[in-house]
Amino acid sequence: EVQLVESGGGLVQAGGSLKLSCASSGFTFGDYTIAWFRQAPGKDPEGVACIKNSDGSTSYADSVKGRFTISSDNARNTVFLQMNSLKPEDTAVYYCAADRLLAYTLEAMRAGALDGMDYRGKGTLVTVSS
């Protein structure tokens, strides 16, 4: 059974930091690209960052570049999202998702197509207070 389980969300003040984790199982981790999406209340999902596990290449949405860092621990089948300098507009449910194709993942991130990814988790809530 494929599982993607997010953790690390919570309440933080603006300017603060949080580190999200995405623990995965049930598929060959190194063959997949893992992405973080987020969905704010009343809004469509937004692709945030992704990492291709086979070579470590990464991509970020402009809205988080320079503030968020995605990383992967292939030995633990876990992907992390370090979020610094958080802003109230970063408030959302954050989901991790996996797909075999980097190209598709990048397109899904641009389109906010979280449900189009091969696998996805149930999300963790991040709330940034002003």
Image (cartoon, rainbow, N blue to C red):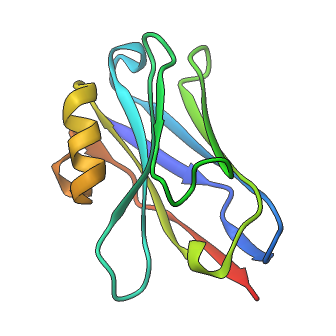
* Viewport quadrant of the N terminus: top left
Q: Residue at x 47, y 21 (%)?
A: 57
Whether residue 108 is visible, yes or no, is: yes
- Position of 46 relative to 10 (above/below): above
Q: Quadrant of residue 3?
A: top left
Q: Is residue 110 left or right of residue 51?
A: left
- Position of 125 relative to 100 (above/below): below
Q: Quadrant of residue 105?
A: top left
- Position of 100 relative to 85 (above/below): above
* Residue 97 percent across, percent down from the top left: 36, 44
Q: Is residue 126 left or right of residue 57?
A: right
* Residue 126 percent across, percent down from the top left: 62, 71
Q: Is residue 100 left or right of residue 90?
A: left
Q: Residue at x 58, y 72 (%)?
A: 90
Give the number of marks.
Answer: 0
**In front of the other: 78 or 1:** 78
* Residue 38 percent across, percent down from the top left: 44, 64
Q: Is residue 1 left or right of residue 93?
A: left
